[in-house]
Image (cartoon, grey):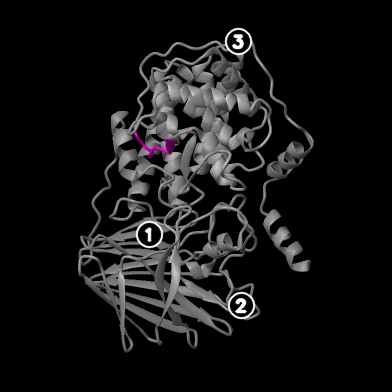
Amino acid sequence: MLNNALLYLNTVKHLKLKQIMFRLYYSIIKIKVKTFQEAPLRKMSSDWLSPQLLQQSYCGNNEFIFLNRKGSEDSIKNNKLWKYNLHYFDFLNVHEPKVPFEECERLIESWIVKNKHSKGDAWEPYPTSLRVVNWIKWFSSGNSPSKESLLSLFSQVDYLNRHIEYHLLGNHLFANAKALIFSGSYFSGSNASRWLDTGLEILDKEIPEQILDDGANFELSPMYHHIILADMLDLVNLAQTYDLAALTKRVDSWKIVISRMLTYGNKMTHPDGDVSFFNDSALGIAPRYADLHRYASELGIEIIQDSPRESINGLELRFFKDSGYIAIESDSTKAILDVAKVGPDYIPGHAHADTLSFELSLFGQRIFVNSGTGEYGASEERLRQRKTAAHNTVDVDDLDSSEVWSGFRVARRAYPSKPTITQNTDGINVSCSHDGFTRLPGKVVHNRTWHFGQNKILIKDTLEGRYQKAFAHYHIHPDVEVSKEGSQISLITPNGKVISVEASQQIEVLETTWHPQFGITVSNRKLLVPVVDGHVEVSIRF
């Protein structure tokens, strides 16, 4: 009982007063759907550019595949995230394969009939926001809406405008604002003007809040970074489709933000073209970097190229100081180091206890991977995937660097020190510590140093303070073969490259699981190395 109370206290104390007040408000006030007799449209000034960003999820016969699970609205029970995806209507704007007009129209009309009242997942503000945008995109792509569809859409936007997620903030609020801006542009009249003004007022505050100066989305998830980047590109697309002064005067500043986001997204992407796994991040949810880059080019957005950086032994380093990630790369190496906070203090819902973790690709192949995100919700498995031991870092006395709990909550958090970065003829050194374990009786501080040299990486972990046991975890991509001979570990990539791993302590090879997508569990292995007398070193040679 006391522990639960402390978890709540250490979680709630970081919230903004606005979040608490609106949570109370929405628990008391029940917002109802209004009906309208007309939904006047605004004339488009140019065609909507409709890029291919996502895979088709509609399988025909009222069946969909979301989160790698195929089914229908009636057959999938007790899976909130699956239901959310059902109500997004992403499938409308996928062109390969394209769902016929008549089938799309039927599915829209079916949704209207089944969801007349503001109940259930369908009317929650986040899926409503995504559905509103998807309907407008589809209607703007040469698909004439029925009167019933327009009136329903108008009612949905009106409902959303009275149910903005100020209690959550973050990417949910961003999605709400985007939907209001789309609706205020698509429709005309006094309601539309209010929606447009409200959406723009929110984003004028949220863009500088949520998109850091180094280009990162402040929730520090590569997956959500791509989602917000796609949102920003859609806003520029909208401004080019509707000749509205309120939009066009913001376009230049939006494009600058997009360029920064593209640079960051590129550095946080592995050579295989997919996102890295820090915090809540998985494949198959957000658009891939290459597709976002192509979309930006189609919109005429100039991509700001990275200025050349000094190379040390063929290695280049980029430190994103606002977000707290470091990318180090060469022709054969791509390493991403996490020296970041878990996320914004008032909204760390997508955080994992992964401080001082890293991911590594060699010769184009992922080698060391964090365990990914296979599900949402409040299950034990969801919690396990968020724990420190599921990441390439050190846990102490079976505890996590940050107190992740439930599905989306964090109590006491690890705060990293400012990293020390040195570059010389010997290579690159990055050192950083965090205080996440100082809540333990032994007041443990974890310090990690990465050394990148010629075809080698040395990782040193030190623990200052008292503890009973501690382990460094190194999770290996499932496509990489693991061979152990004595004290030496050999990692063999699918193309035959051999990476040697040695440690100052005995290495144990354990079975575990990797979760590259929602609903996917892949068996893999990890190296477990004890931290003895406050010290352990692991060398990686290739």
Left-right relation of 30 to 163: right
Q: Disc 2 or 1, which lies upstream in sequence? A: 1
- Name the residue that disc number 1 marks: 326
What percent of the width, then of the height, locates residue 199?
56, 27
| Type of amino acid under label 2 | Lys
Number of the front mark, 1 or 3: 3
The N terminus appears in which quarter of the rendering? Answer: bottom right
- Give SS at disc 3: loop
Left-right relation of 150 to 461: right
- Quote the CA–CA distance across marks 2 and 3: 65 Å
In the image, residue 53 lies in the stretch drawn in magenta: yes
In this rendering, is residue 516 above or below 455? Answer: above
Q: Disc 1 or 3, which lies upstream in sequence? A: 3
What percent of the width, then of the height, locates residue 209?
53, 42
In the image, residue 93 lies in the stretch drawn in magenta: no
Number of the front mark, 2 or 3: 3
- Name the residue that disc number 2 marks: 443
Q: From where the camera sits, is residue 253 visible?
A: no
Please rate how many residues cluster around mark 1, counting C-alpha atoms within 10 Å: few if below 14, some from 14 to 19, many from 20: many
- Name the residue that disc number 3 marks: 38
